[in-house]
Amino acid sequence: MRSSGVPRRVSKQKMTARAAVVALSACAALNACTAWTAKPTSGLLEAHDPRERLQLWVQGRPHLLHGIRATRDSVSGVPYFQPPECESCRVRFALSTIDSVRVQHVDRVMGRNVMLVTLLAISVFVVIGVTAVSGAPVSP
C-alpha cells in the first residue's frame, strides 16, 4: 500500500516475472530432493537397469553414468546425457581406480513430490492470471 492508503496495481509483466521466479524456485527445490545412496564398488558387478544413474568417483572426479557394464577388473558406462545405447560414448575405468560409487534413487515419493510442486506452480499461475484478468489490485 502507498502512504495514501490506496493499493497500487502491479503490472502484468511484474506478475509474470514473479510467477517465473516462483516456478524456477520450485524446480530448484525439486533438484535438491535427489536421493543418492552409497554403494560398495563390489556392487558394480551386479546387473543394472540401463537407465539407472550412477555417480562414479574416479581419482577424485565425479562421472555421472548409466548403461553400466562391469567385469572383474573394469567398469564401463555411458555419460548420463547420452543415450545408454551409445557405444561410441562409452567410457571405461579400471575397478582399482574407482574411489566410491553412489546410486540415484527415484521412487514413488519423489514422483508424488514432483507432481505436488507442479500442481502448486500451476495453481500460482492460475491465481495470478485470474487476478490480472479481474483487475483486482495485487499487493507487492
Image (cartoon, rainbow, N blue to C red):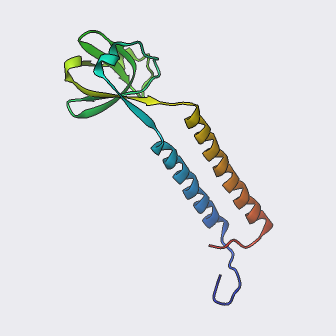
Where 73 falls versus 111 (above or below)?
above
The residue at 46%/17% (across/down) is: 49
Where 111 falls versus 131 (above or below)?
above
Indicate the position of residue 28 as horizontal and vertical percent values: 49, 48
The residue at 61%/46% (across/down) is: 117
Q: Residue 137 vs residue 86: left or right?
A: right
Q: Split into 4 quadrants, where in the image is the N terminus? A: bottom right
Number of disc labels:
0
Indicate the position of residue 122 as horizontal and vertical percent values: 68, 49
Q: Split into 4 quadrants, where in the image is the C terminus? A: bottom right
Indicate the position of residue 111 as horizontal and vertical percent values: 59, 35
The answer to which quarter of the image holds residue 64 is top left
- Please indicate, yes or no, whether residue 97 appears anywhere in the rendered image: yes
- Please indicate, yes or no, whether residue 90 appears anywhere in the rendered image: no
Q: Residue furthest bottom?
A: 4
Q: State the residue in front, 61 or 8.
A: 61
Q: Residue 52 vs residue 39: left or right?
A: right
The residue at 64%/64% (across/down) is: 15
Q: Residue furthest right?
A: 134
Q: Residue 7 vs residue 72: left or right?
A: right
Where 31 falls versus 125 (above or below)?
above
The residue at 19%/19% (across/down) is: 96
Indicate the position of residue 92 as horizontal and vertical percent values: 27, 18
Q: Residue 60 vs residue 102: left or right?
A: left
